[in-house]
Structures are given as C-alpha cells and as structure tokens.
Image (spheres, rainbow, N blue to C red):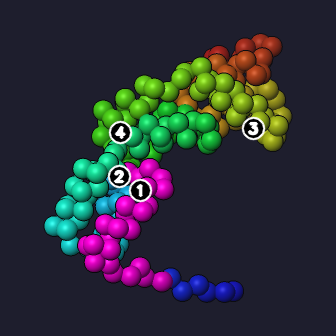
Amino acid sequence: MLQTKKIAPRAKTPEQALAALMRLCARAERAEEDARRLLVRWGIAPADQQRILERLRRDRFIDDTRYAEAFVREKIRLSGWGARKIAEALHRKRIDRETIGRALAQLDRDTAAERLMELLQRKMKSVKAATSFDLKNKLIRYGLSQGYDFEAVRDAADRIISTPDDSCENFF
C-alpha cells in the first residue's frame, strides 16, 4: 500500500496571501469563510486576516450574497440538490440565514420539481424493490437525502409509482 505524505501548506506573508486570494476569487466565486480558512491555513495573523478580508470585500472579490446566489444556481442545475441541502451547505459556509433565504427565493420551484422528477426516475432504474410500496419508500428516502421537502418528494414518487390500493397513504 502506498503511503502519501501530506505536505503542509507554506506560510505566506499577508501580501502574498492577499494576492493569492485575489487570483482565486477572480477565477471562481468564494465565500468569505473559504478565504478565512485559507488565511488560517497559511498562518496569517488574526489582525492581518481582518485587514485582508476587508480589502477583498471592499474590492468585491468576495461577496457572500453573490456567492450564495451562484451556489444555489449551480447546485440545483448541476447537482440536483433540493433547497434544504443547499441551505445546510451554505450555513456550513457561515452565510447568514437572511442571505440564504434571499438566494433560495430566486430558486424556480417548477425547475426544482422537474429536477426532482428526473432524479427519482433515474434512481428508479437502479433500485431493487420487491413491491411498489418498497420502491416508493426507497425513492422517498433518496429524494429526502437530496434535500427536497417531504411533500414534494412524496408527490413526485406518487406520480412515478401509482400504487393500486394506496396502502402507502396510511404511513404518511
């Protein structure tokens, strides 16, 4: 078995850190928390961290509102995540709840519902289930794990799988 040696990141001066973050932020949206973690990893003093973050905010290299909006668009279109999973990921990036709420408000509910249907239909092809009840439950669990709310997942699963006796309704 090969053992890989983990290389510690080189310490940077505040000027090097600022230049590196400007390059990173110019290429892709970054949350302020991403920049803060890098600064800590590079060994930048707390006072210098604040100064660098303020400069990045002032020059619009980082903007959590812009980041949250881009994150929502990317995760719904490319990853197929639901609103709950997106909100949790943004919360882990220390984006405030109001910003998360505004970014999610721009989410097109029809697009999200279509994406959920596509995800469940694709998942249905790989799921092994003895009964339609089992299949429906597995699809519901999968949809919930992708961050969609229960009612939307249940409705989508109902449209995909019609149970003849509606025995599933007793459990929901």
Say if 170 sits above or below 92 in the image: above
Q: Are marks 1 and 2 in contact (CB under 8 Å)?
A: yes
| Residue shown at the point (77%, 36%) measured from the top left | 122
Q: Are marks 1 and 3 in contact (CB under 8 Å)?
A: no
Q: Mark on residue 61?
A: 2
Callout 1 amino acid: Cys
Residue 108 point in image, percent of width and height: 53, 23
Residues at marks 3 and 4, CA–CA distance in whole angstroms: 33 Å
Callout 2 amino acid: Phe
Residues at marks 1 and 4, CA–CA distance in whole angstroms: 14 Å
Q: In the depicted view, which residue is nearer to us: 17 or 142?
A: 17
Callout 4 amino acid: Thr
Residue 3 point in image, percent of width and height: 61, 86
Q: Quadrant of residue 96?
A: top left
Read off the magenta span.
7-31
Residues at marks 1 and 3, CA–CA distance in whole angstroms: 36 Å
Residues at marks 1 and 2, CA–CA distance in whole angstroms: 6 Å
SS for dot 4 = helix
Callout 3 amino acid: Lys
- Quick check: 131 left or right of 36? right
Res. 80 in view: yes
Residue hosting label 3: 123
Q: Mark on residue 75?
A: none
Residue hosting label 1: 25
Q: Which label sits in the foreground, 2 or 4?
A: 2
| Residue shown at the point (24%, 57%) measured from the top left | 55
Residue hosting label 4: 65
Q: In the depicted view, which residue is nearer to us: 170 or 57?
A: 57
Q: Check residue 19 for magenta coloring.
A: yes
SS for dot 1 = helix
SS for dot 3 = helix
User: Which quadrant is the N terminus positioned in?
Assistant: bottom right
